[in-house]
Image (tube, grey):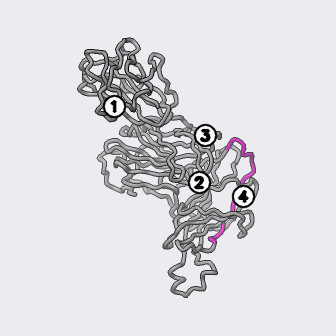
Amino acid sequence: MQVKGNSNIYGDNERVNYKKYRLITDSYINGTNLAKKGAIVGTADPHIALTINLFLREVGMPNFARKDSPKKRKLSRIILITCFTILFTFPLHKAFAATVNLAWNPSSGTNIAGYKIYYGTSSRSYSYNANVGKYTNCSLSGLQEGKKYYFAATAFNTSNVESAYSSEISYTIPTGSTSGTGTTLVLDNGGSGTKASGTWEISGASNSYSTKSVFSKSVGATYSFETALNGSQNVYLWWTYWDSRYTNVPVRIYNGSTLLGTVYVNQLQNGGKWNLLGTYNFSGQAKVVIESRSSSKSTCADAVKFTPAGSSTSTSSSTSTSTNVSSGCTLNAKFKETPMKVGAAYYTDRDYTITGGIPDFMLGRTLIRTVNDERSNTSSNGYLKFANPVNGWVYVLFDSRSSSIPNWLKEWELLSNRITTSFSSQPYLKVYRKQFGAGQCVDLGGNYGSGSSVETRSNYVVVYGN
């Protein structure tokens, strides 16, 4: 992961100098100072999280392992020096939900294979434990309101030798009805559970989720948000606006290593707010991965939010209202739909038909018939809009007489296919394609939008769906 410092490698003014992490000052639990000064941890949710920081002591091998020689004991010792954080997250002015989110810094020991979290309602007598592997965060649900719970961590190495318990932290679950509220979990960039590959810069864009967002113009760079999670969850993404943002950013949602779906988002729209990606079922580990696919356009990574399906998605901030990516995106009634096939009419006001050249992957999909009398439309967006029903390709069939296409179409991929028609003045239709996620708004400009050539040509049409 690279988060660059002083130089501006992209030649624009989006990047700024920013300290990646904040320093936690002394924290107090029951009047006792437990936090290590200057411990570096991820930034907690500034809206809804109560953070308790606990510095855990260094621990050695369990007693049963100390029969080894001093030399062997030194080699096999597991060191667990870490800052242990409890995040009890809840919507303000809502009832509390009995879920606790835990996060900690990695152990500095060698050959660490993973961590275990122990918890229960009696100090140092734990009824439950969770092996979370190498992850440094987890969510514990099903906890009873009004009960005081105790938590401790251990590390274990590749020989399956486990450390002694860390110092203990406790928390009392507030009393309140959990019905209809659920627990909101937010992962902010630079915090626990996040990981970057490739080059990412600190952005100067405003309206970030907390204090900053990051961006990349490195093709193939990824930014991931990962946490232990179970059940059906609404997944939201927050990004910031910049005029160079990429309009087709792929966002992949995983359950463990299994890909659940890919949503393509237009980051020129809906910046500075929560955008719903969809509802997904998780059974242990949830991961959201943002990928940069352009060297000329920027991709933003800021924050990801999970809320139990069916719960309220409002937050404590009036600027954080939730918005579906495809909200207000409906096909105008002047356009008509028909199956894509030979003989299909492709305009609503002409009798021209498709005569051949349809590739097999396009047959049977939905053809959106446009109005040819509107071929002179010069808008850059908003001419034709619809919500894509599935994850997949959307195709624009464009008059081959054009020597230069409009700017809104220039990020689409040109295929080699040529679709022929019964219109003798039109040699063929060129095929452009672009991927969109399920529920994502497809927002297209006019036939003569900015950047296009001015020669005579007919209107374009669209093909989409299964």
Mark 3 crowd level (few <14, some 14–19, many ≥20, 10 Å Cα) = many
Decide if residue 461 is on the left or right side of residue 235.
left
> Which of the two discs, 4 and 2, labels the residue nearer the N terminus?
4
Decide if residue 178 is on the left or right side of residue 159.
right
Which of the 4 image quarters holds residue 144? bottom right
Q: Nearest the camera: 216 or 231?
A: 231
Task: Name the residue carrying label 2.
Answer: 284
Which of the 4 image quarters holds residue 170? bottom right
Instruction: Say which amino acid is labelled 2.
Output: Gly
Instruction: Say which amino acid is labelled 3.
Output: Thr
Q: Is residue 297 above or below residue 82?
A: above
Mark 1 crowd level (few <14, some 14–19, many ≥20, 10 Å Cα) = many
The magenta span reads 165-181
Decide if residue 466 is on the left or right side of residue 399.
right
Q: Does the magenta run of residues contain 178?
A: yes
Q: Nearest the camera: 218 or 433?
A: 433
> Disc number at residue 172?
4
Task: Name the residue carrying label 3.
Answer: 313
Task: Name the residue carrying label 1.
Answer: 432
Q: CA distance from mark 4 to mark 1?
A: 58 Å
Q: Secondary structure beneath disc 4? A: strand
Q: Is residue 156 above or below residue 282?
A: below
Marks 3 & 1, CB-CB < 8 Å contact: no
Q: Secondary structure beneath disc 1? A: strand
